[in-house]
Image: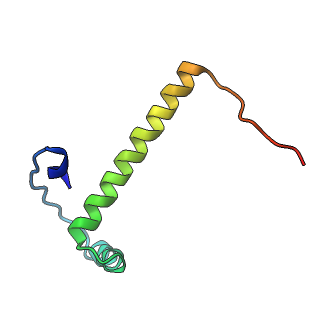
């Protein structure tokens, strides 16, 4: 995942509960991924979501709180 952007990667070792690992395996299997790939994709998605929300917040601060267009029926 990181090599596409030109960044380097490093190893992160985790000690996790066996029950959690089993759940991760199940989620990864449903998506046809390894546990490592599933965890990396999940972390990347969460990181993107946080950065996206921060950008939206900054945009709203810059432009002010504008009401959204609504339609009436």
Tell me residue 2's x, y (percent).
18, 51
- Please state, as top left, top right, bottom left or bottom right, where the N terminus lies in the image: bottom left
Looking at the image, residue 5 lies above or below residue 42 = above
Front position in the image: 64 or 22: 64
- State the image quarter where residue 32 is shown: bottom left
Looking at the image, residue 53 lies above or below residue 73 = above
Q: Residue at x 75, y 36 (%)?
A: 69
Looking at the image, residue 3 lies above or below residue 59 = below
- State the image quarter where residue 22 is shown: bottom left
Q: Is residue 60 left or right of residue 48?
A: right
Q: Residue at x 58, y 20 (%)?
A: 63
Tell me residue 30's x, y (percent).
36, 79
Q: Is residue 11 left or right of residue 53?
A: left
Q: How is the image coloured?
A: rainbow
Q: Residue at x 36, y 53 (%)?
A: 45
Q: Is residue 6 left or right of residue 66?
A: left
Tell me residue 61's x, y (percent).
55, 22
Q: Is residue 50 left or right of residue 4?
A: right
Q: Which residue is situated farthest in the right direction here?
A: 73
Instruction: Count numbered badges in the picture.
Output: 0
């Amino acid at each position: 995942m990181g090599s596409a952007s030109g960044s380097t990667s490093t190893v992160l070792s985790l000690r996790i509960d066996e029950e959690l690992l089993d759940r991760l395996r199940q989620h990864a299997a449903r998506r046809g991924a390894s546990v490592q790939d599933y965890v990396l994709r999940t972390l990347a998605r969460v990181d993107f979501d946080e950065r996206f929300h921060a950008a939206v917040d900054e945009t709203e601060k810059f432009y002010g709180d504008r009401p959204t267009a609504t339609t009436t029926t």
